[in-house]
Image: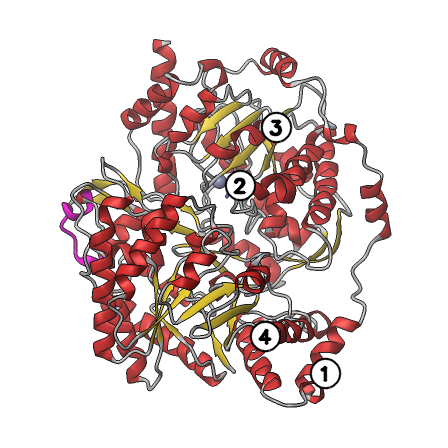
Amino acid sequence: MKTSVIGYPRIGELRELKFATEKYFKGDITQKDLKNITCDLRKKHWKIQSNNKIDFIPSNDFSLYDNFLDTAVLLNVIPKVYKQLQLNPLDEYFAMARGYQGEKGDVKALAMKKWFNTNYHYIVPKIEDDTKISLVGTKPFDEYLEASNLGISTKPVIIGAFTFLKLSKFTGKKTAKDFISDIIKAYSDIIKKFNELGAKWIQFDEPALVLDLNKEDINMFNKIYEGILSNKNNIKVLLQTYFGDIRDCYAKTIELDFDGIGLDFIEGKKTLELIKTLGFPKDKVLFAGIINGKNIWKNNYNKTLSLIKELKKYCKEVVLSTSCSLLHVPYTLKNEEKLDEKYKKYFSFAEEKLRELYELKKILSSNNEKDISEFIKNKKIFEEPRDCSNYDVKFKIESLIEDDFNRYPNFNEREKIQKHEFKFPILPTTTIGSFPQTEEVKKNRSNYKKGNISLEKYKEFNKKQISECINLQEKIGIDVLVHGEFERNDMVEYFGENLEGFIITEKAWVQSYGTRCVKPPIIWGDVYRLRPITVDYSVYAQSLTKKYVKGMLTGPVTILNWSFPREDISLKESAFQIALAIREEVLDLESNGIKIIQIDEAALREKLPLRKKDWNSEYLDWAIPAFRLTHSGVKPTTQIHTHMCYSEFSDIIKYIDEMDADVITFEASRSDLTIIDTLKENGFKTEVGPGVYDIHSPRIPSASEIKEIILEILKKIPKEKLWINPDCGLKTREYKEVVPSLENLVSAVKEIRRSL
Ligand code: GLN
Ligand code: ZN
């Protein structure tokens, strides 16, 4: 029995890639330095896999920013505006990822979107009518050779042609269909080159196959692969899918000339059933995704073994695989020095997952598997009870009644009451919450964590930051202020640290986009709040100004979605537990004089089932109520804001309205404001602040540019409903970018106000 890994994380065990890339952006290191660092990282990652005897080790899973963008560059999908900058290839690549502002021009970054149901974000390529898709890059071949030179033979991994076309954006008249023959040629050339290099297998990642597919999609998939596979010669082609089952095209897939098919048995609820009912061809290898690539709990060997046995009845050859790339889990438990073994024994990060593959292979190749010590040890973990329940919490959840989810009076009445209460100017300006996390802000936190400074000193520093932040916002002329979130490392981790039931790790970073990583907390047990969390800083911030300062919380769905969830209770139950804790915090803020409270749901969409049919039954019917539960207890004069980002909202717009917040701010500028039309068409009731500039890029928008955008929005949204704000929190930016950007934002608004 063989083992396979779909992809390995690349940011580095201690985020080496992040730090190196950021140094390069600042001009502190050269391209050559960056190259050396990345070379070392790849080598290290291949070696770890090879030490664990992985049979199919991926190459080209590495990326300097994003794999999807790598594929675009490989295929010559580079929009003209970037070519015109005439930068060197590396800087052109980063210009697409992050935007460019310098002596050669001023161009925005490409759009960034959530990668399926993960917290990873990919760069969306733009295909123009005159784009000529063809193989022009060499990255996959270079990395394959790099591994070969180390004596490691790898399985090159590339985003498949179907997913590439499905997820790219077409800017002109042409659509995916018009590029099919070019893309077949390009992928055939890739195969040809790998044949020359002597690669045995190539993996095409086709996660788009787990989406809702119509006839046309399936025809396109079929056409593309009939074309590509007719040119495969000696190489074996693995069609790799993940994040769900491929029920819409399974029948077609098994007819095509693939040598291996990779299916997800973790999230693919129907995968086994498909194999049982439609069979699996004898001449193909099944790559069975049984090691969860998205969660950090240990694999239950006993269950996996029964599944593999079942599969062997239908499939001639089964390879043990991860369920998706390990990109979505942290590197290794080894660095968690503060975590007690009593917890650790339940977890498995990327490196430990390699070990699990190794052990499963060992167990499965013995005749008497149940006698193998690794099996016995694993079985014991799942048999012992885990100390993680709180009966009080369980009781509170069971006692919830319908009215706990409804806020009174209804939105329209509240809107009137609040207009009267707050008397904001037209187009009120605000920000999303965080201000730049400078070196000294981070240092203060780490000094406190290391015990170098006292709690008093730590808080004193934060309060000084808050006071400067309030002054700055007043000086710029923002209407509704924020305290700046200097005490927070991350919007989810912070609540994880302060609520019971969570485990916080030290080094368990996961890449979110480009150089940005997050450290998701682990939900270990039942969640509850022991004491107020944010009240002190919020009340302090409000005491410094006559303007309103927003209390700033993270919503239950986002806390859940950006944590590693439990596997022993339902997501719904965890969400309600967190919602009750946040509700207590909301009510405490209110009773301490905070009049506006923002409850961020940045990740509301993240666990939305990828297939529309499953939305209500599996997700929205508890996610939206969980949010409503947090704020249904406040007075009509308390204004509830929420914020969302990074994703498509159009198709869930009516559910967003049902969250029943008073104001919602969201990311819009990087997705070309298409959302505005949807709001109009759906008669969206909640007041809205579509982000008027992109904070994920260092670029500073001019006042006239912002003014244009606002005027554009005003054509579709009544001025009484519109708020003006950036896309998202400002924590990743520097003051030298933030101050002029906000000044430009305020002056654009002032100009418009004069003309209204
Ligand atoms: N309030 C948070 C911040 O400003 C929201 C961040 C987010 O949406 N990702 O940082
Ligand atoms: Zn955001």
Precedes in sequence: disc 2 or disc 3: 2
**Helix, strand or loop at mark 3:** helix
Q: Amino acid at mark 4?
A: Lys
Residue 299 in view, yes or no: yes
The image quarter in which residue 271 lies: bottom right
* Mark identifier at residue 612: 2
Labels 2 and 1 touching (C-beta < 8 A): no
Task: State which mark lies toward you, 2 or 4.
Answer: 4
Question: In the image, 459: left or right of 287?
Answer: right
Q: CA distance from mark 2 to mark 1?
A: 41 Å
Residue at 34% x, 55% y: name it: 222
Task: State which mark lies toward you, 2 or 1.
Answer: 2
Q: Amino acid at mark 1?
A: Ile
* Residue behind mark 3: 658
Residue at 69% x, 31% y: name it: 631
* Mark identifier at residue 313: 4
Q: CA distance from mark 2 to mark 4?
A: 32 Å
Read off the magenta span: 81-90
The answer to whether 253 is drawn above or below residue 175 in the figure is below
Question: In the image, 508: left or right of 192?
Answer: right
* Mark identifier at residue 376: 1
Q: CA distance from mark 2 to mark 3?
A: 18 Å
